[in-house]
Image (cartoon, rainbow, N blue to C red):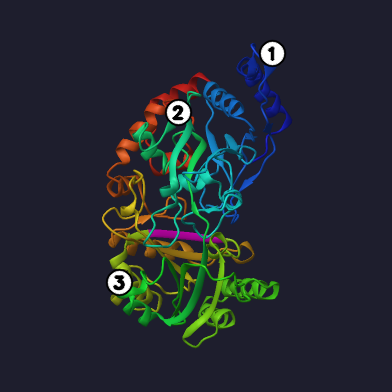
């Protein structure tokens, strides 16, 4: 998308300068509310999978500045996208209109020591939240693989960890304040504005700007973790026995060409801290070697199984059994290095269907199309490892978000088909792989992770997957009839064109 030229800048100011002045002036205080805007920002996702050039890039520092942005966007017929780290590899955060970043709106507002609750501005990143909690002797009850996201972004896209004793991260959100398209700030919680609360726990940025969050912490804890090399067949045999309940946190990395999986397990402990073992991935040479070998495999795809086995051996060894352990602070133990640029296609299916999913996908990847039941050829397709296997149980949550992709009747399996982009080069045949993967996931009753690289799910299918999607859309239309927060991503995947949006654009 081309950058605005000087003439375009003049035209923009001609149409908006009067509106900015009228909206930002406070006659009582005799001051103007700052409008912190950049005209030359280039946005990219963390993985550099998508790029966009917003007309305006805004970094407000106060609630009044956010209100000015919202009111001005509504008057000018602009759309607003709120972005944090851009860690989602899809184009969910891309726009040619106005982009708002809340990194400068990330302070602690209040704390309630007896209840272990913290009120904070929603631009705070998860690593900042972890630090604030640690100062108070508190911690997050659950965490995903990274802490780069803003707290608002993690809520909006339904971030999860891997534990059957926990649901998604939104389980710890006990209240929010949302600035609507009208400029009005509204509080919601399980006891106040309940529908808005249930809809906003997975908002996809479509309801307004989450400005404040009330977070329920737990006492700080350390985790003792260990990981084990296990034959994938043995891992599947243990699936319905005790694999997912041996310890509080469990996740699996499946290596399809090696016949092996890494089972990572962690439990709370009072043992003293103990550093994690050296990682081949983490060292500069190992990291570069892995990316270089993946790059070679983009030109010579049949080389990929050799790469997987070599990397597995260098990182973990080969013999079955324990291959590393440590005692770390909770947020250090639960996070991991995402390495380099990647596509990520993750689906949620019922936990009990996991063995079938893995066996059928394994059959397809090794050329047994008939045995896989997947009606696409796997010829020429060689995938990357690991395929991440994680779990959660949102049925234990008191409040389940309307657009929660997790299973509503029991524990959920999240199967994550990652494809690396070595030196930003796309792997060959990645679209066909994802088409086949999604066919299998749909057949097993799956739903895609909203923020990842799903490729075949349609509006009609989403309507069938989410019984309350119609309610979510209706509430969104009531809160934002002019379409200020109706992003192109939402229009493409969920929403129908609204007459109100067309009218606003015509008037502008």
Location of mark 1 (residue): 30
Mark 1–mark 2 Cα distance, whole angstroms, equals: 27 Å
- Secondary element under disc 2, as helix, strand or loop, is strand
Task: Report x, y in % for residue 29.
Answer: 66, 14
Main SS category, magenta section: strand
| Residue lying at the far right of the rendered structure | 6
- Secondary element under disc 3, as helix, strand or loop, is helix
Please report contact status of discs 1 and 3: CB closer than 8 Å, yes or no: no
- The boundaries of the magenta stretch are 342-347
Q: Earlier in the sequence, mark 1 or mark 2?
A: 1
Mark 3–mark 2 Cα distance, whole angstroms, equals: 45 Å
Q: From what the image shows, is residue 121 above or below residue 63?
A: below
Q: From what the image shows, is residue 100 above or below residue 28?
A: below
At x 38%, y 55%, the residue is 167
Q: Earlier in the sequence, mark 3 or mark 2?
A: 2
Location of mark 3 (residue): 356
Q: Residues within 10 Å of mark 2 (few under 14, many from 20)?
A: some
Please report contact status of discs 1 and 2: CB closer than 8 Å, yes or no: no
Task: Report x, y in % for residue 248.
Answer: 41, 65
Q: Earlier in the sequence, mark 1 or mark 3?
A: 1
Viewer can see residue 469: yes
Location of mark 2 (residue): 186
Q: For this view, does 499 lie left or right of residue 343? A: left
Q: For this view, does 166 lie left or right of residue 67? A: left
At x 68%, y 19%, the residue is 32
Q: From what the image shows, is residue 122 above or below residue 249?
A: above
Asked whether 402 or 4 is in front, the reply is 402
């Amino acid at each position: 998308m081309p950058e605005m030229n000087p003439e375009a800048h003049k035209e923009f100011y001609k149409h908006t300068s009067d509106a900015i002045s009228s909206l930002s002036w406070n006659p009582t205080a005799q001051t103007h509310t700052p409008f912190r805007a950049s005209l030359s920002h280039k946005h990219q996702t963390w993985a550099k999978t998508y790029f966009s050039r917003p007309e305006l890039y805004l970094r407000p520092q106060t609630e009044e500045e956010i209100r000015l942005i919202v009111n001005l966007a509504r008057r000018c017929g602009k759309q607003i996208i709120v972005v944090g780290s851009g860690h989602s590899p899809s184009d969910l955060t891309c726009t040619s209109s106005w982009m708002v970043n809340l990194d400068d709106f990330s302070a602690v507002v209040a704390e309630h020591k007896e209840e272990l609750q913290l009120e904070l501005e929603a631009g705070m990143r998860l690593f900042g939240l972890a630090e604030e909690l640690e100062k108070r002797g508190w911690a997050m009850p659950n965490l995903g693989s990274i802490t780069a996201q803003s707290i608002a972004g993690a809520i909006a896209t339904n971030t999860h960890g891997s534990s059957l004793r926990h649901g998604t991260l939104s389980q710890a959100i006990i209240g929010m304040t949302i600035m609507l398209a009208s400029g009005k700030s509204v509080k919601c919680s399980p006891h106040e504005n309940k529908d808005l609360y249930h809809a906003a726990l997975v908002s996809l940025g479509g309801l307004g700007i989450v400005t404040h969050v009330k977070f329920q912490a737990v006492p700080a804890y350390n985790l003792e973790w260990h990981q084990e090399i296990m034959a994938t067949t043995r891992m599947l045999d243990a699936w319905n026995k005790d694999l997912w309940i041996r310890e509080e946190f469990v996740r699996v990395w499946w290596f399809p060409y090696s016949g092996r999986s890494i089972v990572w397990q962690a439990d709370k402990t009072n043992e003293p801290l103990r550093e994690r073992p050296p990682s081949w991935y983490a060292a500069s040479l190992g990291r570069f070697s892995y990316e270089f070998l993946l790059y070679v495999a983009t030109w010579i795809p049949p080389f990929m199984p050799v790469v997987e086995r070599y990397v597995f051996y260098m990182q973990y060894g080969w013999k079955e059994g324990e291959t590393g352990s440590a005692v770390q602070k909770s947020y250090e133990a639960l996070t991991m290095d995402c390495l380099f640029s990647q596509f990520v296609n993750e689906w949620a299916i019922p936990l009990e269907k996991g063995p079938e999913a893995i066996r059928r996908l394994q059959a397809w990847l090794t050329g047994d199309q008939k045995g896989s039941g997947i009606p696409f050829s796997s010829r020429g397709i060689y995938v990357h490892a690991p395929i991440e296997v994680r779990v959660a149980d949102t049925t234990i949550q008191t409040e389940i978000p309307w657009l929660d992709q997790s299973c509503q009747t029991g524990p959920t399996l999240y199967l994550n088909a990652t494809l690396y982009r070595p030196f930003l080069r796309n792997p060959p045949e990645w679209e066909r792989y994802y088409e086949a993967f999604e066919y299998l996931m749909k057949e097993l009753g799956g739903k895609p992770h909203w923020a990842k690289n799903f490729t075949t799910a349609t509006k009609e299918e989403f309507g069938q997957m989410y019984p309350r999607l119609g309610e979510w859309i209706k509430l969104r239309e009531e809160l934002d009839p002019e379409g200020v927060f109706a992003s192109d991503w939402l229009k493409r995947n969920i929403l129908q064109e609204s007459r109100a949006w067309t009218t606003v654009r015509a008037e502008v």
